Structure formats: structure tokens, C-alpha cells
Image (cartoon, grey):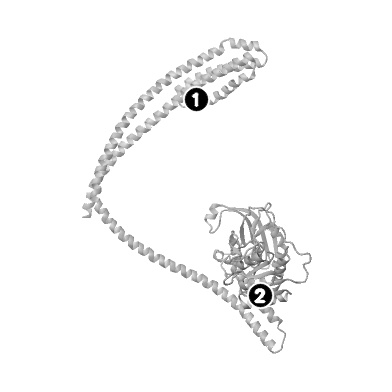
Amino acid sequence: MIARLRRATRWQSLPLVAGFAVLALIVGARSLLVEGQSANRIAARNAIEYQQLLSGLLSLAQDAESSQRGYLLTGEKTYLEPYRKALVSLTGQLARIDEMTAGDDDRLLQVTGLKDALKLKLDELARTLQLYDAGDVAKALELVRGGKGKAAMDQIRERLETIRRDGGAELQARYARTDRIEYWLRIGSFLALLAIFLLCVYTVRESRRRFRDVILAQDQLNRKNVALTNEIATREQAESQIRQMQKMEAVGQLTGGIAHDFNNMLAVIISAMNLTQRKLARGEHDIEKFIEAATDAATRAANLTARLLAFSRQQPLAPQIVDTNRLVTGMSDLLRRALGEAIRIETVLAGGLWKTHVDPSQIENAILNLAVNARDAMGDEGKLTIETANSHLDDNYAATHAEVTAGQYVMIAVSDTGMGMSAEVMARAFEPFFTTKPVNKGTGLGLSQVFGFVKQSGGHVKIYSEPGEGTTIKIYLPRFFGSEDAAAPLGRGDNPAAPVTETILVVEDDPRVRASTTDALRELGYTVIHAAGGQEALQRLAENPGVALLFTDIVMPVMNGRKLAEEALLRMPHLKVIFTTGFTRNAVVHNGVLDHDVHFLAKPFTIEQLAAKLRDVLDTK
């Protein structure tokens, strides 16, 4: 049955194949005719151009002769300008004629005779001008009257007439061939249309017969598509579940790392505080080591929080126009103390380095983090190289690296001669809490902090490393294109050590934080007024017009710190303001950057940091 169906299909297809073969033959023959017609037209155009070029030779020779006669009669150099132009044009036209006659022996013979006659004429003109310019006018005129030039011109005209006659006959022959080709093209077009019509009739009949089979096949295809769609949906659901599991695993790793480190620090703090309470209850006062342990653990917890904010790109940045070469040079003493005498430090600073607009303290932290990691990788001895350069990341590089914008960057490279990294370690190097260092030798947040800062600043980080060959980490920071004038230094009071006399208004909705902040300020000698919210703070300001500075939390119910500061400055334009918060995605930070002229102190802070910030703001003129 199947064999009969196949034979029937082949016999049914035979007329269609034969029809297409005839149509292809007709179309092919027509294409050849079209090509022939096109060739004839091109040849005709070339023949016309050839005739025009030859006519131009005569015209140029006449121009040269007229120019020579005018110069001989008047002696004016200006009459020679057409002569010179004619010589230049003759060179170009003869080159074009040589190109058109290449391979055509008949034309080549004609042109050779023409060029000989033209050369005689030009030699006569040149010789005459040479004699005239040499002062032998009589001999120059004698040469003109001698008739050689006229004979050469007559010879040029005679040869041109011969060439025109032969070219005209050739052109007429081509026109006749073109007419014949057009006749056969019309016949071929008619036959092609007839063949197309017959094929269309046959195809329509066959299409009607097979349409039903197509509908049946389409129904089967639709059923298979529905089954395939269901399978794709099932796979997508499974992939979504896998992605969710991977996210939960990443969150679990991050949460576990945070919980581990924070629990260790809280354990130290709680133990130290409990021991302190017990000793104080017994009247003992040797508690300094417990307070130092608790303070150290709290400081480490604050640093951990800052690193997590850096990794998540939520830290508040205060960007400035930075000369990276000067910054790296200024870090030399700090790096030597951090790395020790056994590590050799080399800097390779590029000349003409571009400026960048970033937070300088964060660049220093990033370089220091990379340097400390390099020291740990090198062990007792090695070489650390810090290099700067102007770099351009092109579109191809940006297309193969996520979150990279093509453009110009300032590159900082930190290289070491340590043990290097495997591909697996490089793939996870920027993950938080991932570290290859021994227990209690690292938190695994150094590189993640660098990564977060660079990405938040619009830059890019790249690791190059091989086991046993050392590591290079390159930081790319966007080039700054604005004005490079540094900001004017802040003015300071004439007596920075003057006694504290200002009154400060503290606004904090958390009563414990408010109490601790108030106590710290009083310890520093300030007069302190406090409020639990925005409305109460405005009332305190109205009652105390001598308040010099508003120290306010940002995240508060009803009225946040930014709105409170705006309202307070409307009432007291000379009031100084310092914002504080433990989380910076708020009204004073946009795109990770502090707003202009905003003073900010992140929680938690030490009393020394508080004192320095207060004097920095209050002493500003």
C-alpha cells in the first residue's frame, strides 16, 4: 500500500517537475538574452565614450595650439594657461583611451597612429615655446610657419575621422544585435508567462486536492504543540523551583555567615557585660579588660554591618574628584605598616592619568583590602605591585560582562606573587563569607566589600589568576569628564580648641538610643535638648532659639528627619544639621550617594567620631 502511494505521488509530481524544468529553461534562456542585451548596451556606451574621448583629444590639441599662438603674439604668460591645462587633460584622456583599447588590436593600431600624430603636434608646440622663452623669437615663428604643426593637426583630424567612421559602423552593428535580442526577449517573456500560467493552473488543481491532507496534518501538529507547550510549562516550573532553591541556599549561606559572626560578637559582649555586673556587685573594679572586649566586639559588629552594606551597594558614599596617583602615593606608609617589611611594594603610576569621581576613603579601603589579601596569599615574603592606567572598555567587552558600560575608565591593578587562585575559587571570590583562609583568619567579606563599592560607583572589577602564578585584581572606575577644580577647603574657626558652648537638639524616636546619644553629648560638654519626634522637635526649637545644631535620626514615624530639617531651616536658616541612621536607603541618599551639603554620621558611632563630626560641622564658617 505504501509503495503504491509512493509511486502515485511520484507520477503526480512528474508534470509539475517537467513544467518547472521547461519554465527554468525559458527563464534561463531569457536571462542569457538579457545578459547579452546588457553587454551590448555596455559596449555601446563604451563606444560612445570612446568617440567622445577621441573628439576631446582634437579639442584639447586645438586649445593648446590656440594658447601657443596667443602667447607668441602677445608674450603674455596668461595665454599659456589653456596650453598647460590641455597637457594635463591630454594625459588623463590618453590613459583612459589606453585602458579602453587594451586587448583590442584594431583599436590599438588606430590609437597608436593617432598618438604618434598628437605627439608630433605637441613636440612642435613645446619646441616653439622653448625657442620663444629662450629669446629666439624669429626661429620660433619660422618653426610655426614651417607647416609641420599644421600637417600634424591634419593627420590627427584624418585619423580621428577614420576612427569615427569605423566606430559608427560598429555601433550600428551593435544596435542591430540589440534589436534582435529585444525581439527574442519578447518571445521568451511570452513563453515564460504562458508556462507560469499553465503551472499555476496545475498547482491550483493539486492544491485543492491536497488541502484536506494539509488540514489533517495541521490538526496533528496542533495536538503535538499543545503537548509540547505543557511539557515546556512543566520544565519552566521545575526550573523556577530550582532557581528559588538556589536563592534560598544563597540567602541561607549569607544568613548563616551573619548569624555565626554576630553570635560570636554578641557572645563576647554578653559575657563581658555579665562579668562586669558580677564584679561591680562584689565591689570589684578590675573590669577594664571586659569593657575593652565588649567594645572591640561591638566595633567588629559595626564593621561587619558596614561591609554587608557595601556588598549590597547600600553604603552612603561621599564622592569627590580624585587624583588616583596622588591617593596611591599617599597610602605608601599605611601599606608598609599593614604588609610588613618582608613584602616589597612597587607602584607603577601612569602619566596623564584621568580623574575619577568616587569616595576617596572607599578607594583607600579597597586598595588596603586587596593589599592585605595579597599579603596573606604571599606568606612571609613576596612582591606587591600597584599600577594605575587609563583604560577603555569597548562595546565587545561590555557585551560579554554583565553590568559593564562601555567607556573610559581609570584602572587600578593590585598584583601579588602569591599562590594564585583556581577557577573554582575565582568564581566565588566575591561571595560574602566565602574565604579560603584558616578559621579566625578572615571573614570572607573583604573582596565582597570591594565588589560592592566598585559596582555602587559605576565601575567594574576583574580577577586574573592562575595557581602558583599569583593574582591580579583590576578595579575600573569611571572617568570624570567635568571640571577638575577641587572643592574649596572648609573654613575653620580661629581657635579649634575653644571650650564647648553650643546647644544641640537631639531628635530620636528610640528612647534608648536617644538617652545614650544625649549622655554622650553631655559628656563632651554640650548643652542638650532632646525630642522623640518631628513635631516635638519643632516645638523645642521655638522654645529655644539658641540651638546651634540639630542632630536627628532620619527614619522616624509621621515626620522623617529630612522633612524635619527642611521645616527647621525655614524657621532658623543658620541652624546646622547632622543626620544619623543605621540604614541609608532614605531621604538623604540617592543612588548610593549623599545629597549635596548633607552632613551624615552612620550608626553606630563612637564618642570620638561624634565629637569630631560635631566640631567639623559647628566650626564650618
Q: Residue 143 sits in which quadrant?
A: top right
Kind of residue at disc 2: His
> Please, which residue is most extreme toward the bottom here?
282
Q: Residue 523 sits in which quadrant?
A: bottom right
570, 390: nearer the viewer: 570
The image's mark for residue 192 is: none
Position of the C terminus by quadrant: bottom right
Q: Residue at x 64, y 57 (%)?
A: 357
- Select label 1 or label 2 by which is in front: 2
Q: Are marks 1 and 2 in contact (CB under 8 Å)?
A: no
Report helix, strand or loop for mark 1.
helix
Q: Position of residue 376 (x, y in %)?
A: 65, 68
240 in relation to 322, above or below: below
Q: Residue at x 43, y 18 (%)?
A: 165
Determine whether, in the image, residue 384 is placed left or right of residue 465.
right
Q: Is residue 420 in sight in this rendering?
A: no
Q: Position of residue 594 (x, y in %)?
A: 62, 63
257, 526: nearer the viewer: 526
Residue designated by label 2 = 530
214, 490: nearer the viewer: 490
Determine whether, in the image, residue 493 is placed left or right of residue 436.
right
537 in relation to 326, above or below: below
User: Count of labels shown?
Assistant: 2
Kind of residue at disc 1: Ile
The image's mark for residue 97 is: 1
Q: Is residue 90 in sight in this rendering?
A: yes
The residue carrying pointer 2 sits among few (fewer than 14), some (14 to 19) or many (20 or more) residues within 10 Å by Cα, namely many
The residue carrying pointer 1 sits among few (fewer than 14), some (14 to 19) or many (20 or more) residues within 10 Å by Cα, namely some
Cα–Cα span, label 1 and label 2:
101 Å
Report helix, strand or loop for mark 2.
strand
Q: Of marks 1 and 2, which one's residue comes earlier in the chain?
A: 1
Q: Residue at x 72, y 87 (%)?
A: 284
